[in-house]
Image (cartoon, grey):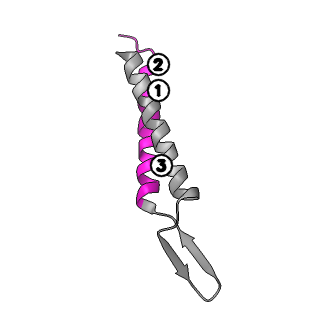
Amino acid sequence: MKTLLLFLGVLVATAGGVITYRALYIEPTSAVVITETGIRQIPNQARVVGGALLFVGGSALALFAATRRNR
């Protein structure tokens, strides 16, 4: 059971990292802000936050499954 939780945690963390990376650096921006000083592109913040939450949650699950608990 612990092995399955560890494997699932690593998979979720990997998926979250990939989603976050793609939203920040690869996929087209969701908005462009034009000011007098320049143009700034904004990534899709919902995907960035969702991917980061998946990454943190999966990492926590994997760490929880990998550590030994005394009973």
22 inside magenta stretch: no
Q: Which residue is drawn at 64% across and 82% down?
A: 38
Q: Which amino acid does label 2 sit on?
A: Thr
Q: Distance between the residues labelled 1 and 3?
A: 21 Å
Q: What residue type is labelled 3?
A: Ile
Q: Which residue is drawn at 59% across and 75% down?
A: 40
Q: Which residue is identified by label 1?
A: 63
- Residue contact at pointers 1 and 2, CB within 8 angstroms: yes
Q: Which residue is identified by label 3?
A: 19
Q: Residue at x 45, y 62 (%)?
A: 45
Q: Which amino acid does label 1 sit on?
A: Leu
Give percent across and percent down for residue 8.
Answer: 40, 28
Q: In this view, does 30 lie above or below 13?
A: below
Q: Which residue is identified by label 2?
A: 67
Q: Which mark is residue 12?
A: none
Q: Which of marks 1 and 3 is nearer the N terminus?
A: 3
58 inside magenta stretch: yes
Q: Distance between the residues labelled 3 and 2?
A: 27 Å
Near mark 1 (Cα within 10 A), the count class, few <14, some 14-19 or many ≥20, is some
> Which region is colored magenta?
46-71
Magenta stretch: dominant secondary structure: helix
Give the side of residue 26 with respect to residue 61, left or right. right
Q: Is mark 3 on a helix, strand or loop?
A: helix
Q: Nearer the viewer, residue 66 or 32?
A: 32
Near mark 2 (Cα within 10 A), the count class, few <14, some 14-19 or many ≥20, is few
**Quadrant housing the C terminus:** top left
